[in-house]
Image: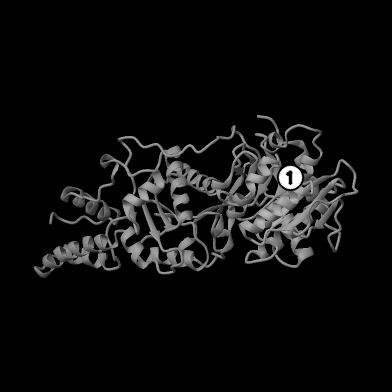
Amino acid sequence: MQVLKRYFMLFLLLLTSGCSTSKIAATGGYEDVDAEFGEVTFTEKEDSFRVGVLLPLSGEASKQGQGLKNATLLALDDVRNPNLILQFYDTKGTPSGARVAVENALNQRSRLIIGPLMSSEVRAISGAAVSKEVPVIAFSTSADVLERGVYTLGLLIDEQVNRIMTFAAERGRSRFALLLPDNSTGIAVAKAAVASAQKNGVRIVRIAFYPPETTDFSNILKKMTDYPQRVARLEKIRASLNSRADRGDANAIRILKRLEPLDTLGDVDFDAVLIPEYGPRLKSAASMFGYYDVFSPKVKFLGTSIWENTNLSKETTLYGSWYPAMSRAHSSYFAAKYNDLIGERPSTLYSFAYDGVALASALSKQDGGDLNETIASPDGYVGINGAFRLLPDGRNEHSLDIVEIRSTGDTVIDAAPKRFSETPEEGNHGIFVDSSYKAPLIFGKDSALAQTLIYGHQLSPENQPSTYISSEKEQEIVREALAKLNIRVPQM
């Protein structure tokens, strides 16, 4: 495996140089271009590398757009490239605004497009940019809008899910459940999880869907955790023991005393659960699992990178939980500089804009050749968030940390690899179903519809999950549950 591109190692130098300026004073140039402009004449040197930066500088996403713009200017200050010119265009956060923006960027000799932010905007500009052979490096997290020449730096769902599930599988977790919003994001997570499970030789046993805006998880988790059945199992044991105790059986009385603290009997059939949520919904879901007698470490709680947006240091139910995050090895430099110059802590999203400009600076030094081939180099790059690479089909791979939630704060327990050791996989490898495959149980959504959305079709009868538990299996579950409590109950 070759080493990472040498020119992107500039970040390692930047990290030691510090920031001595009190304002952004970029070497190179930037222009806020009015959306009404058409073809214009420039007087700069012929070798200037003009980059159209398409951001929602007005509209509902203007806060994110301005943050991304700030990050591009910080990067422009750091790369110190006099031939790099950034031209800013306001997409207004709409497809129509994005189309106007890209037309003007192309008319004004942009050789590379950075942005836009949202998938609908990327879809709106891709045709025009690809037809002019001008690569696009967007920030969208939707793989559906990507193709050769249209890339994204955004953190995609597939790589997050695969990173956390692979880590959990390597540490002995083999039966996964998913708690997902009933929307396109939930389906995307389900697809990625099923594919990762097959890759890692583990199973997805349950998937529960909930209304995306809810904070009440009581009903869906009651079903997902088999809470009524586990309660009934305990009550059946107690009823039998009470009958014996009423007849003076001292052993039955002792066992009843030991069962008093329990609300349920028997474990759930999963040992890890993935919850791609944040904020109040994540906290509500985690606490409700505890209400239904599902606790860590018996069940490991797993998240995606959006967990980083929520302070979980006081959520005791989630202590010991894991989630993937952008590499923290160098990101403190960007966060400190942004905070110093802008006066606020940056979102992780903004760091992608920084990396985009640094990549543009490197591309500006290329003497001829196809920019797409350089952009999609399999060696990848070292950015402000660690190693990453853009793939020929537009997707990307980031080198991600695994973070554990602790009372003392989130702690990296498995650092992101410093380089990529494998050739990137191309295309959507999908999900492979044969006669031995058992689909997960589905809650909160029609099973046939959910299977169609996840697998592309409804699965055959032999692949359908079974909820039937024979009396012999039920007795085995009870014996195993009591044995874990060091309780031996006479034959009922």
Whole-percent x and y of residue 161?
50, 48
- Amino acid type at image mark 1: Leu
- Seen in the picture, residue 62 relative to 121 is either above or below; the reply is below
Whole-percent x and y of residue 261?
30, 67
Instruction: Using the rendered image of the protein, determine whether residue 166 is visible from the camera's viewpoint.
Output: yes
Residue at position x 85%, y 53% in the image: 29
Question: In the displayed structure, does residue 45 sit left or right of residue 7?
Answer: right
Q: Which residue is label 1 attached to?
A: 112
Q: From the image, which quarter does the N terminus lie in?
A: top right
Q: Give the crowd class for mark 1: few <14, some 14-19, many >=20 residues within 10 Å.
A: many
Instruction: Using the rendered image of the protein, determine whether residue 386 is visible from the camera's viewpoint.
Output: no
- Seen in the picture, residue 205 relative to 148 is either above or below; the reply is below
Whole-percent x and y of residue 310?
56, 64
Give the residue at the far left of this rendering.
247
Question: In the displayed structure, does residue 373 sit left or right of residue 14?
Answer: left
Residue at position x 86%, y 45% in the image: 83
Give the residue at the far top of this rendering.
1
Residue at position x 16%, y 51% in the image: 471
Residue at position x 82%, y 50% in the image: 85
Assign a secondary structure to mark 1.
Answer: strand
Q: In the rendered view, how is the structure colored?
A: one colour
Nearer to us in this view, 7 or 56: 56
- How many dots with numbers? 1
Whole-percent x and y of residue 328?
66, 52
Question: In the displayed structure, does residue 177 sit left or right of residue 366?
Answer: left
Question: In the displayed structure, does residue 432 sit left or right of residue 17?
Answer: left
